Amino acid sequence: MPSTDKMVRAEVRRLARKGKLIDEAFKVFQRSVYPGAPADQVACMRTCFFAGAAEIWALMNAGADEGDDVTDGDMEFMSSWVAEIERFHQRTIDTMNAATRQH
């Protein structure tokens, strides 16, 4: 489950205006997935999380059609990379579940 699933739209927008959205999303992710992780691991994960967010932003800007209006090409582009993330997420869950069943 993405970390933002636990946030409501108003809170997401409030955090974005304050420049704290990615940081809060990371905190929710870290507490959900790696509670009790050592500080050095949390710092490394945070760097990776922010790098991933920056890369998604860059890819969105590079792949979007020019202009202010959302195009069919934009929607296809977004759907394609969201589907890629969802496939990865499902494979990760399946792998974790398989490992749990083996123990």
Image: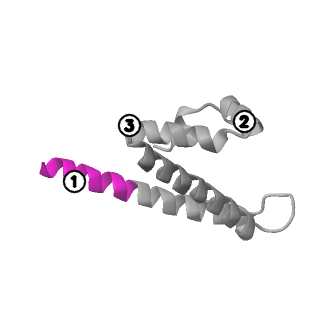
Residues in magenta, as a range: 90-103
Identify the residue at image location x=53%, y=33%.
Answer: 6
- The mark lying in front, picked from 3 and 1, is 3
**How many marks can you see?**
3
Quarter that holds the N terminus: top left
- Kind of element beneath mark 3: loop
Say what secondary structure mark 2 lies in. helix
When asked about the image quadrant of residue 80, the answer is bottom right
For the residues labelled 3 and 2, the Cα–Cα distance comes to 26 Å
- Main SS category, magenta section: helix
- The residue under label 3 is 35
Residue 88 location, quadrant? bottom left
Q: Name the spot of residue 22 as percent of width and height, x first.
A: 63, 44
What residue is disc 1 on? 98
Q: Mark 1 or mark 3, which is nearer the start of the sequence?
A: 3
Give, as a three-letter code, the residue at label 3. Pro
Q: Foreground residue, 90 or 41?
A: 41
Count residues near mark 1 (Cα–Cα under 10 Å), then give few for <14, some for 14-19, many for 20+.
few
User: What secondary structure is found at the residue carrying circle 1?
Assistant: helix
What amino acid is found at the position of numbered circle 2 in the picture? Arg
Of the residues under marks 1 and 2, which one precedes in the sequence? 2
Q: Amino acid at mark 1?
A: Ala
The residue carrying mark 2 is 13
